[in-house]
Image (cartoon, helix red, strand yellow):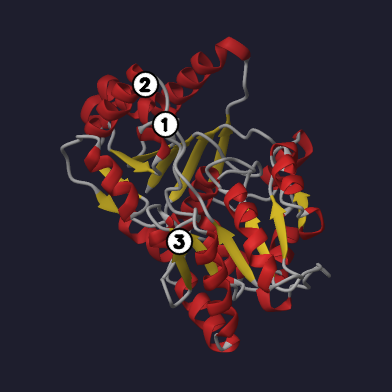
Amino acid sequence: MQYLIISSEFPPGPGGIGMHAYCMAKGLLHNGVGVTVVCSMDYATEDEVNNFLSQLPNGLQVERIKRRGILTYTHRIRTIYTQCRTNKYDKIILTGRFSLWMGWLLKMIFAKRVQTICFIHGSELNMGSSMAKWVTKKSLQMADVCYAVSGYTKSLIEQSGIKREIRVLPNGLDKNVWQDMDSVQPFAWQGSPKLLTVGSITQRKGQHNVINALAVVKEKYPDVHYHIVGKGDKKVLEPLIARLGLEENVTFHGKLNDADVKRAYRSADILCMLSEATEKGDVEGFGIAVLEANIAGVPAIGSLSSGLEDAIQDGVTGTLINPYKPQELLDAIGDLLSKDKITFAANCKAWAMQHDWDVLAKKLL
């Protein structure tokens, strides 16, 4: 069998949609499916991209679409059309907003010759102009199968008025990438407890919510330290940190390579993702960083009313809280620190292993 994945992003650049597509592709490979990926590979250097491409597993091909200014979208359409015209794919998987739109176009051109499966992460539904939202909804209705990455995302689709069957297939990870976590050497980071967020510095990821609560947390835990890993401009958070007098309690580590991201997880006591929906419609559809932390034995604290409700087993692998109530973060930290660390770490690892893409990909066959 041969599948085509059309994704709006792909490693080695950052982004949950790209990592989702990559892990899904490898899961399909491990189930005997040949995979071609058409994607952008932004926010990575040419050396990083070339090194990544040189290490792709057999059976996985990547057709990279480079940005060409105002001709970028024309180039994308031409590349995808050529792939579908010259190759016979058993299924085409669409992930990312523009990819969904391409699925609609492919169905109109090739009709029953193509079978499309779309993945909805959440933000695609509410971001952009009214026309963009309309095109997205039509694209979802045209797909043969539609998956939401969480129950939360499914609820957003239903609230948008789309009338069709929506299945849920949660986000996952490649267990083979994370199987050596016990031997990973942690950083000599300061802090007790050490809190961590992994993700781009954005309103959606909610680093500001952790910082806002940190002043309250510091009253009980004066040595608490918040470590922020991910690309983005730290200047957007520095005024808040200064106003709360937390300069000695927050460290920005920037974007880290894969090996150092593993070390970051091993260095933390608790992962914090106090994500929030933005006015522009950007939402947290799942939160893959939770599973990555869990497989390192690290519990997570995440936001209610977000896709993190699917990523965190409340009371088993972490705690769900209101991201705007600092006292809830303080209470959750105290509760997690009081747990038997060995037992709780085992719960976290077992939960992450349930989300291995080798297993999840079987539902796409």
Residue 96 horizontal/vertical position (percent): 44, 36
Q: Evaluate if marks 2 and 1 touch, with contact meaning CB atoms under 8 Å apart.
A: yes
Which of discs 2 and 1 lies nearer the camera? The answer is 2
Label 2 vs 1, first from the N-terminus: 1
Q: Which residue appears at 70% of the width and 72% of the height? A: 221
Q: Can you tell which mark lies on residue 357?
A: 3
Which of discs 2 and 3 lies nearer the camera? The answer is 2
Q: Evaluate if marks 1 and 3 touch, with contact meaning CB atoms under 8 Å apart.
A: no
Which of discs 1 and 3 lies nearer the camera? The answer is 1
Q: Is residue 15 above or below residue 314?
A: above
Name the side, left or right, on which 88 lies relative to 229: left
Disc 2 to disc 3, C-alpha distance: 31 Å
Q: Which residue appears at 49% of the width and 60% of the height? A: 302
Closer-to-camera residue (220/200): 220
Q: Can you tell which mark lies on residue 132?
A: 2
Label 1 vs 3, first from the N-terminus: 1
Closer-to-camera residue (77/232): 232
Look at the numbered disc 3 and give the secondary structure of its residue. Answer: helix
Q: How many marks?
A: 3
Check disc 1 and report the residue beneath it.
97
Residue 105 horizontal/vertical position (percent): 32, 21
Q: Amino acid at mark 1?
A: Arg
Residue 343 is at least partly visible in this image: yes
Q: Can you tell which mark lies on residue 242?
A: none
